[in-house]
Image (tube, rainbow, N blue to C red):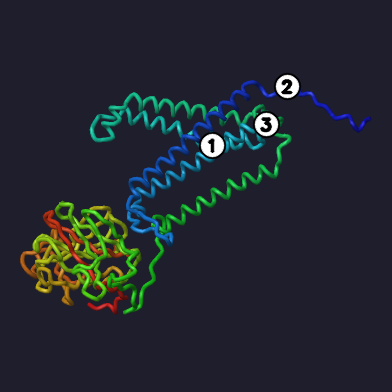
Amino acid sequence: MIEQIEPFHRVSESERPPRWAGWTVRAMRAHFAAVGILLLAGALAILAYLFALEFERVTITRGLRIARPGSIYERGIQAQMAGAVLLALASALTLRAAGALGGRRRGAPAAARLAATLLLLSLPAGGAVWWQADRATGSGVIGQLLSNLSLGVRLAAVALIIQGLLAAWYWLATTRPAFRRLFEVYDRGAIVMVRRLGWAMIGLALVAALALGLGLAVVTDWLYELPVPRPAPGELLYATSFDAFNDEWDLYPGRDSVQVESPSGSPAGGEPDNALVIRYGSGVAEQVIWSALDRKFGDLDLRVTARLLDGPVDQNQYCVAFRYRDERNFYLFCVTADGYYSLAKVRGGVQERISDWGMTDAIRLGAAPNELHVIGRGDEFRFFVNGEPVWLCLKGANLNSMWIGPGVCVDGGTLTDVYRDAAFTQGHIALAAGTIDGSAVTVAFDDLIIVGPGAATE
C-alpha cells in the first residue's frame, strides 16, 4: 500500500512564475519566429538575386567545375554571398530560440538571451537609418530614393529602434530568477540526450558553414591566394591549338561572342583547323572583350598567334591579358593590324596606360598573322611581336606615356624594353579583341603555348 503512494508537492504562490514572465515568453517566441522567417527570406532573396542577375554567365560543368567564374571573384559579389550566409545563420539562431521557448526547454533562457543580443543590433541600425533619412538631400540615386521614401524610411527606423528596445527587455528578463523558474517547472521531463544532440548538430552545422565559407574564400582568392609553383625554365605549362579540350576557356554567344571554330571552314576530307574566334560588336569605342583560361600562372613565357578576320585595319586591337585576377585587375598587351602596340594595367577597374600606342615594323599589317610574346618573371615583363622585342615608353616624370615618333619617347619619359611592377604576382591569362572607334571586329587566336621563362637577361 505504501509503495503505491506517490510524493506530491504543491507549488506555493511564491514559487509560481509571475504573469509577466508568461507574457514575455509568448512575445519573445512570436518575435523571434517572425524575425527568423524574415532573415531567412532575406538570405534567399540575396541568393536568388545573385544567381539570376550576377551569375547569368556562370555554369557548372559535369565535373562540378565552375566555368566562366568572373563574377564570383569580385569582392562585392563575395560580400553579398557572405551576407546571405550570415542572414541564414542569424535566422537559424532566432528560429532555434523560438522553438526552445515554445517547448519550454531548460536551455531556452540561454538561447533567448543569445537571440536578444543579436536583435540589440537593431538599435544602432535604426539610429543610422534615421540619420540617413535626415541627411537625404535628393542628390544622387540613394539620396533621391531616401527623399521619395522619407516616411517609409522613418517608419522602418522607428520599427528597428522599438525592436532593439524589446531585445533589451528580453535580455534583462532572461537573467531574472523568476523567468528561469518557468522553464525549470516545464522541463523536468525533457530528454537530456536528445537536447544535447540537437545542440551538437547545430554546432556541427555552424562549423561546416564556416569551413565552407573559408574554403570558398581561399578558392576564390578573397581571403588567401594559394601561390602558384615557380616553373623550371622551359617547363611546359599549357599548350593548345583549340582543336580539342576547350572547356577551360570562357565561351559565350551573342553580339559580343567567343567561340571555337574554323576561321576558314572545314577543308575537304580533313578536320577543321579550329581557333578561338572573338567577335566584338557592341559598338563602344576603346573597349575589348576576352576569354579567360581557367588556369593560373605566375612566371610565364607565353606565345600566341593572332590575326584580324574582319573589321577595319586601322580601328582594331587584339591583346593578351596576363596576371588576370578578375575583370577589374590585370595587365593587357595589345597590338593593331596597322602596326601599333600598347601596354596597360587595369587595377580596381581603372585603366592606366603604361605605354601608349607606339609604332613598330615588327607587326605584320592587315590580315597577316602576328605572334604576340609575353615574358613575365617576378615583377619584370618583356614583350615581343614576331620575335622582335618592342620598346616601351614609360611616363617617368611626365604625367602620361607619349611617343613623339617611332622609337622616340617624349622628354621626361623612359624608353625601356623591361616593365617592372609588383601589383599582381600571379593570375589567369586571357585573349582579348576589341575596337578603337566602335567598329565591329573579329579576331582569331591560335597555337597558344606557355612555358617557364628562361634565365633573366638584361
Name the amino acid type tagged 1: Thr
Q: In this view, does 22 lie above or below 235?
A: above
Q: Is residue 190 above or below residue 410?
A: above
Can you say which quadrant of the picture contains the N terminus? top right
Q: Circle 2 sits in a helix, a strand or a loop, which is it?
A: loop
Dot 3 or dot 1: first in sequence order is 1
Q: Name the residue under label 2.
A: 14
Q: Residue 154 in the image: x percent, y percent?
A: 36, 25
For the residues bearing labels 3 and 1, Cβ distance under 8 angstroms: no
Q: Residue 309 in the image: x percent, y percent?
A: 15, 65
- Mark 3 Cα within 10 Å, few/some/many (few <14, many 20+)? many
The CA distance from mark 2 to mark 3 is 16 Å
Give left or right: position of 110 versus 326. Answer: right
| Numbered badge on residue 183 | 3
Dot 2 or dot 3: first in sequence order is 2
Q: Residue 341 in the image: x percent, y percent?
A: 14, 66
Please indicate, yes or no, whether residue 271 appears anywhere in the rendered image: yes
For the residues bearing labels 2 and 3, Cβ distance under 8 angstroms: no
Q: Circle 1 sits in a helix, a strand or a loop, which is it?
A: helix
Residue at left 43%, top 47%? 82
Q: Nearer the viewer, residue 221 or 253?
A: 253
| Numbered badge on residue 401 | none
Name the amino acid type tagged 3: Phe
| Numbered badge on residue 94 | 1
Q: Residue 329 in the image: x percent, y percent?
A: 28, 57
Q: Nearer the viewer, residue 32 or 276?
A: 276
Dot 1 or dot 2: first in sequence order is 2
Q: Circle 3 sits in a helix, a strand or a loop, which is it?
A: helix
Q: In this view, does 220 lie above or below 367?
A: above
